Structures are given as C-alpha cells and as structure tokens.
Image (cartoon, rainbow, N blue to C red):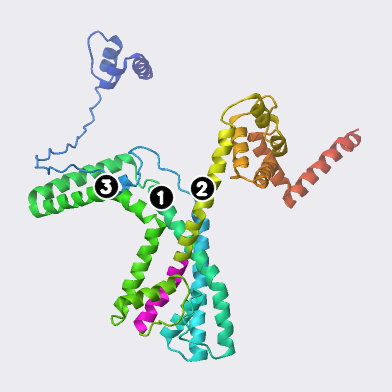
Amino acid sequence: MPGRRLALAVCLLTAPPSAAISGHPTRGSGAASRVARLAPPLPRPSVRVRRRLPSPQLPRLSAPRMTASPLSRAAGAPPAGAPPPLAPPRIVTRAFTLRVLGATVALLAGGALSFRRWEGWPMVDCLYYTTSTFATIGFGDLKPTRSASRVLTSLLSILGVGLLGGLISATLEEWMRSSQNADGKAPSASKPLLDDSAADSAAAEDALLAWWPLYARGVALRRTVHQRLARLAPRAIALLSNPWVQVSLLYAVGVCGYRACTPAVSVAEAAYLILGALTTSGLGDVVPTGRSAKLFLSLYSPFAALMFARVLAFIALVPLEEARRRKQLAVLKRYAHLSKKTLDEVSRGPLVKRLGISEDDNFCTRAEFTLLMLVLQGKVMESDLQECVATFDSIDADCSGKLTIEDVELLHQRRLLRNPRLQRRVMMRAWKSLFRQRWFPFFRS
C-alpha cells in the first residue's frame, strides 16, 4: 500500500498538466494512463454560468447620449481615465473665513442688543443702525443719545471695514477657487463599477423612454437646454468676471429690492439711496422709512459697500498690474538671447553668489535659471529663498546638499536621543560596557 501511494505521487509529478487535471486515461500519455489505473477518476466540478438575458431592442432618441454634464465639460473637465487635477489647499482660507464670520456676526448681534437696551429702539432699527454704521454709511436718521452708545458707534465704525473687508475677500477667494477647481475631486468609485452602473442606468432609461413618450420629450428638452448652456457658459463666466458688470448687477439688485420693499418710493429716489449705500456717502436727505426697507438695507448695505470698494480697487490696480507685467517680460526678454555676458551673470553673477544657488561657475542649470528669473521679476524675494535654504539645511542631517534615506535615519536617531528615558538607557549601557571592559577581567583573573 505505501509503495502504491509512492508510485501514484511520482506519476502525478511526471504527468503533463492536461492529463493530471482531467484525471482520465489518454492514449500515448504513459504517465497519465498509469495514474488512471492506480486512482479512480476525479469528479468534475459543476460550474453554473449565469448569463444575462439579451435585452430587447428598444427605440432610441435621435438626440445623442451625453456621458458627462455639458456644464462640467465646458468648465474644462478632464477626459475619462485622466488623473484628477490637484486642488489647492483651502483649509487655511476656510478657517480664516469662519473666524471672521463669527467675529462679524458676534459684533453685529452684540451691537444691536446693546442699542436695544441703551436707546430703546425697535430691533429692526437697531439692526439697521448697526449695519449702516458697520459699513461706514451713516444715514443720520437715527442718532445715539447716551455716551455708551456713542462709544459703541465709534467702535463699530472702526472695526467694520476691517472685519467686513476680510470676510468678503476670503469668501470671494474661496468661491473663485472652488469654481475654478470644481473638478479637482477624487473619484468616489472605481471605473468598472462606474461602467456597470452607467450601463444599467442606460438600459433602464431606454425602457422608460420607450414606455413613456412624455418622459422622452422631457429628456430631449433637457438635453437641448444643457447643450445650449454648455455653449453659453464660457461667455456668461467671462461676462460676470467684468467688474463693471458686477457693479451694475449689484446696483440693479439694490434698486429693485428697495423698490419691492417700498413701492411708494420713485425709481430716482431708490437709485439715489442705493448709490449712497454703495459709495458709503449717506447724506441723509433720503432715508428708508418702513421696517421692510430698513431690514433690506441692513442685509444689503454692508455687502454692497464692500463689494463696490473691492471692484473699485480692482479697477485701480489694473494699470499697476500691466506695468508690473511689462517689467517681468522685459526681464525675460533680456536673458532670452544667450551671450558670454549673460552666461556670466546667470552662472557666477553677484546676485547668484549672494543667493547661493550656483552649483558650478561654468554652467547654469534650469532650476538655477528659474530661481534667478523669479527673483529678478520680483515674484520671489531673497528672504523667501533664505528661509527655504534654512529649512533645507535643518533637515539635511549629513550636510551633503541632498536629501536621502540616510538623512531620514539620522534625524530619527536624533529624535530618539532627545527622549530622556532613552538617554538614561543609553548611559546605563555605556556604564555597563565600561565596567565590563575595565573591571571584569580583573575579577576573572
């Protein structure tokens, strides 16, 4: 019996794969035939194959099927299979926005409650006075009478511009970043799962389109609207980016909103009042009278004044930005043609030596040239480079000028040696080794 088992094992090792797997004798395969005679045939595993039933041929719409949203495609969505673009970090901006928003809301609420207690005004009037003072408008229809109210008014006028300016700037910057990087998100599922889900949803939609003609008309209309929006989206974004268009829309919203709150006021008076709120002039000859108008100006005037100031600052900075851009292009144009003089400047010039970015005086690498151009254009300051160099030197443990795995190990050892418990352990080991080397041979002899 043991010999038969040994022969069976030898035959299994020497048999070809097809014969060993099938377990049935075949002519011309001696080892396989011996296996079949020594052992009974192995049972075949039963495998049930689940097949998908063929879906019936359903009529399709003439409109082409769109695999992605037209708006996302117009906004510059990456193609299928491409890695998602890296989105800039927004944690700092979001935290700053929340802090400024919390301080603004707390100051407005505290000011309104304080005026309510000290002056006895209605809550709407308190909120209206607080926000108008916060935005430095000051219509003059409400006047504080107590000394504490006047001190609080001065405090609101001082802190208002700073807090609201920081809030509006941070909010707009975060909104612009999110709109520019709307597609910079990691995929939530793998591609095979997305393909299967898309196929199932397409089959279900085809069945619904064939069964319900009204739904088919709605889908066709929706696709037509999406296609038109995809064509109009770039134009609309470019139009809304114009600061004059932003001011016009803001002014129109203010006039229409104030007219909706007070229908008895003429268009000229509403436009005059809203212009005073935008420019923070507030002469006081035209003031809101109703509660709804005061509540509307309480919500509109701070945002409108700061947005108007931001747009005017942007318009004023356009010539300065153009001049700075011309100077930067002049720097690039100067070093666009290589000569012996320019090579000496970019490889061993005084600025290069002061920055310490030259690896060799005989040549200039791409990284060195890029850093030098950034400094000459004013995009990077010398102090910024010095801070970066100091940070690099702090993590370059072996002072080789390169970051390698040896630097990681050395820094890890230094961090371990800073542990007091580990220091005591190392000292004990050192004392024990010293004692064994000097005193143990004496006791042994």
Question: Amino acid under label 3?
Answer: Arg
On residue 231, the disc is: 3
Q: Quadrant of the C terminus?
A: top right
> Where is residue 55, by image quadrant?
top left
SS for dot 1: helix
Between circles 3 and 2, the one closer to the viewer is: 2
Q: CA distance from mark 2 to mark 1?
A: 23 Å
The relative height of residue 359 versus residue 429 in the rendered view (above or below) is: above
* Image-based side of 440 in relation to 38, left or right: right
Other residues around mark 3 within 10 Å, as few (<14) / some (14–19) / many (≥20): some
Which dot marks residue 180? 1
Give the mark nearer the N terminus: 3 vs 2. 3
Residue 144 vertical placement versus 372 (above, below): below
Residue 420 in the image, given as x and y percentages of width and height = 74, 52
Q: Is residue 69 visible?
A: no
Q: Secondary structure at mark 3?
A: helix
How far apart are the alpha carbons under marks 1 and 3?
Answer: 18 Å
Residue 169 position, x and y percent, is 49, 61
Q: What is the C-alpha distance between the residues marked 3 and 2?
A: 31 Å
- Would you call the spot at circle 1 few (<14 residues within 10 Å), some (14-19), or many (20 or more)? few
Residue stretch rendered in magenta on the structure: 291-306
Q: Amino acid at mark 2?
A: Glu
Mark 2 vs 1, N-terminal side: 1
Q: Position of residue 201 (x, y in %)?
A: 21, 47
Q: Counting other residues with Cα less than 10 Å from the Cα at mark 2, is it few (<14), some (14-19), or many (20 or more)?
A: few
